Amino acid sequence: MRARGAQREDVHHALSNATSCKRSDDSTPGVERWVVEGKDLDGDVLRPVVIIKDGLVVVTVMGEQT
């Protein structure tokens, strides 16, 4: 997340105020991937990816899509 300039608070805000949430096409059995879209604290669009496997939740942030 830091490589993308996203702070923890920005990601939390984007997840808490998501405008869309879609299951990723590359989800596999036992591994769910969700792409969320929401705004950070500055109002910029952020696209966190939530990965769930064996009860573990990992959140990362994708780069800007073109």
Image: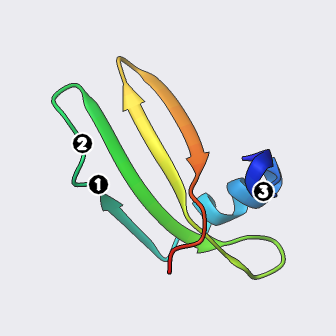
Q: Position of residue 7 (x, y in %)?
A: 83, 52
Residue corresponding to mark 2? 27
Vertical arrangement, residue 12 with respect to residue 22, above or below: above
Give the residue at x 77% y 49%. 3
Residue 25 % position (x, y): 22, 54
Amino acid type, callout 1: Ser
Asked whether, in this view, residue 37 is left or right of residue 2, the answer is left
Q: Residue at x 57, y 41 (%)?
A: 59
| SS of the residue under disc 3 | loop
Q: Is residue 40 left or right of residue 29?
A: right
Mark 1 lies on residue: 24
Residue 23 image offset from top left, x and y in percent: 28, 55
Which residue: 49% across, 30% down?
57
Q: Are marks 3 and 1 in contact (CB under 8 Å)?
A: no
- Mark 3 vs 2, N-terminal side: 3
Q: Are marks 2 and 1 in contact (CB under 8 Å)?
A: yes
Q: Residue at x 28, y 30 (%)?
A: 31
Q: Is residue 28 above or below residue 56?
A: below
| Residue type at the position of mark 2 | Ser
Q: In terms of image quadrants, where is residue 53?
A: top left
Q: Which mark is residue 12?
A: none
Q: Quadrant of residue 55?
A: top left
Mark 2 and mark 1: Cα distance apart in space: 6 Å
Question: Is residue 63 or residue 11 the one in the foreground?
Answer: 63
